[in-house]
Amino acid sequence: MTRIVYVNGEYLPDTEAKISIFDRGFLMADAVYEVTSVLDGKLLDYAGHESRLARSLDELGMANPVTKEELLAIHRELVSRNGVGNGLVYLQITRGSAGDRSFVFPDPATTPSGIVLFTQKVDDLDFPPAAKTGIKVIAFDDLRWGRRDIKTVQLLWPSMAKMAAKKAGCDDAFFVQDGMVTEGSASNAYIVKGNRIITRPLSNDILHGITRATLLKYAAEAQFEIEERAFTIAEAQAADEAFVTGASTFVMPVVEVDGAKVGSGTPGPVATRLRELYIEEAKKAAI
Ligand code: PDD
């Protein structure tokens, strides 16, 4: 099915959209991205994604080729033109194409950044079957680069983790570094003990999840205790519950960690409640 996508100033059918083979996103993974979820045609947590994008660009000395107002308008235009009720908007900004390959960054005065956006429809985004059953994760060495706080398109290791999980009959992976869980392959990771939600504190080791920030705010308001510290795989296996968060999964219960059931092996009350809470509140605040 053809979609209308946005490429460097133009709305085009995806079959007609082109970028240069010299684009640094393609050659060097010199690009950052955001994924914003859409429910009932509205953007969730948009302000958070917009400010994290600005931070990622800033950290890499890259310019945003469009203004804030234009960026929001493009998101909305694509949602509308593609008739997206529930789904995702993918956005990528690259350092552009200098018409050749070089390790040296091109001069932004002569090589503007490139920008691409497209939508993905996901009808059951709010009620996927996995939210009822929970997901199973494997432990996987975190061999990614050291600036995971920057949302770059270097996603080969997370893809390899996902493939290893599938091969093991599981759904996803918890990355592990120095014996501690960092995060999921495309999500932040949590465990639950009683009324307490435990998750790794923000640093360069993990992506500063937008769903994480919003959920922790809602959870604190709902009287959950929050402890920001790293945890081990063994601790996750012995926890009452575990879950992950991300724009494409919201709050997803984890029912098995590296071969051991977590709690009863079914989604627990805290993750289930937090999922409902997040969707309910994020929908109210959606734009
Ligand atoms: N990934 N950690 C990693 C490594 C991620 O890739 C993501 C999101 C998150 C959660 O961040 P947020 O809550 O802002 O979505 C944490 C997106 C969804 C993706 O790559 O598709």
Image (cartoon, rainbow, N blue to C red):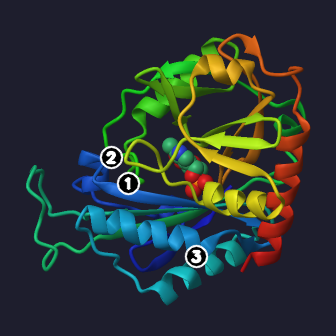
Q: Nearer the viewer, residue 12 or 232?
A: 232
Q: Residues within 10 Å of mark 1 (few under 14, many from 20)?
A: many
The picture quadrant where one finds residue 58 is: bottom left
Please name the residue shown 33% across and 56% down the image: 31
> What secondary structure is found at the residue carrying circle 2?
loop
Q: Is residue 50 left or right of residue 220?
A: left
* Picture disc at residue 147: 2
Residue 235 x %, y %? 65, 21
Whether residue 148 sits left or right of residue 223 in the image: it is left
Label 3 crowd (10 A; few <14 / some 14-19 / many >=20)? some
When the figure is inspected, residue 154 is found, relative to residue 181, above or below; the finding is: below
Where residue 16 appears, as percent x and y from the top left, is 48, 64
The residues bearing labels 3 and 1 have C-alpha atoms spaced at a distance of: 17 Å
Q: Is mark 3 within 8 Å of ligand 1?
A: no
Q: CA distance from mark 2 to mark 1?
A: 6 Å
Q: Earlier in the sequence, mark 3 or mark 1?
A: 3
Marks 2 and 1 close (CB-CB < 8 Å): yes
- Is the residue under label 1 in contact with that under label 3 (CB below 8 Å)? no
Q: How many marks?
A: 3
Q: Nearer the viewer, residue 194 or 251?
A: 194
The residue pinned by badge 1 equals: 150
Q: Residue flagged by tag 3: what amino acid is it?
A: Ala
166 vs 228: above or below? above
